[in-house]
Image (tube, rainbow, N blue to C red):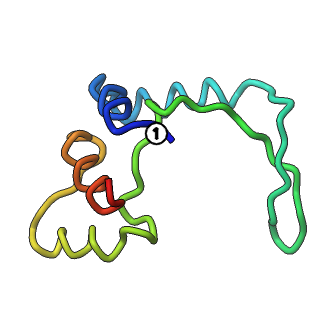
Amino acid sequence: MQSIKYLQLQTENNMNKEERIKRIKEITDKKTEWKQQIPWKGSLEPMPVYDIPLDLLVYNKYNGRILSRTKSLENQKQKIDVESDSSVALKVIYKFNGH
């Protein structure tokens, strides 16, 4: 697992959503030999696996592990914006995950 400092450094580049989508698309448009069997519509289907750099990923603030906490913060008018202020969002999410 990557350290908090590493992830914070990775998000300091402030890559916007469109840039991340473009770079991920460039990766997923390439053919991959890696496959993983995934349950899909009642059977196991081989799905392509890609190596996506961590700096292209953002947290899902509605992930089941932290959903009730993020919703509670939002109900208190606190904003968790993983797109424009990653460092603040990371601190809140890390706190929820016991880091």
Can you name the residue that lies furthest to the left here? Answer: 77
User: How many marks can you see?
Assistant: 1
Front residue of 5/24: it is 5
Q: Is residue 49 left or right of residue 8?
A: right
Image quarter for residue 74? bottom left
Residue 64 placement (x, y as % from top left): 45, 71
Q: Residue at x 24, y 50 (%)?
A: 81
Q: Is residue 89 left or right of residue 35?
A: left
Q: Is residue 72 left or right of residue 68?
A: left
Q: Amino acid at mark 1?
A: Leu
Image quarter for residue 71? bottom left
Q: Residue at x 51, y 27 (%)?
A: 22
The residue pinned by badge 1 equals: 57
Q: Is residue 48 left or right of residue 20?
A: right
Q: Residue at x 80, y 26 (%)?
A: 31
Q: Residue at x 29, y 47 (%)?
A: 82
- In the rendered view, tell whether residue 45 sits above or below residue 55: below
Front residue of 10/39: it is 10
Image quarter for residue 34? top right
Crowding at dot 1, Cα within 10 Å, few <14 / some 14-19 / many 20+, comes out as some
Front residue of 17/55: it is 55
Residue 47 placement (x, y as % from top left): 81, 48
Disc 1 on helix, strand or loop?
A: loop
Residue 59 placement (x, y as % from top left): 40, 50
Front residue of 10/76: it is 10
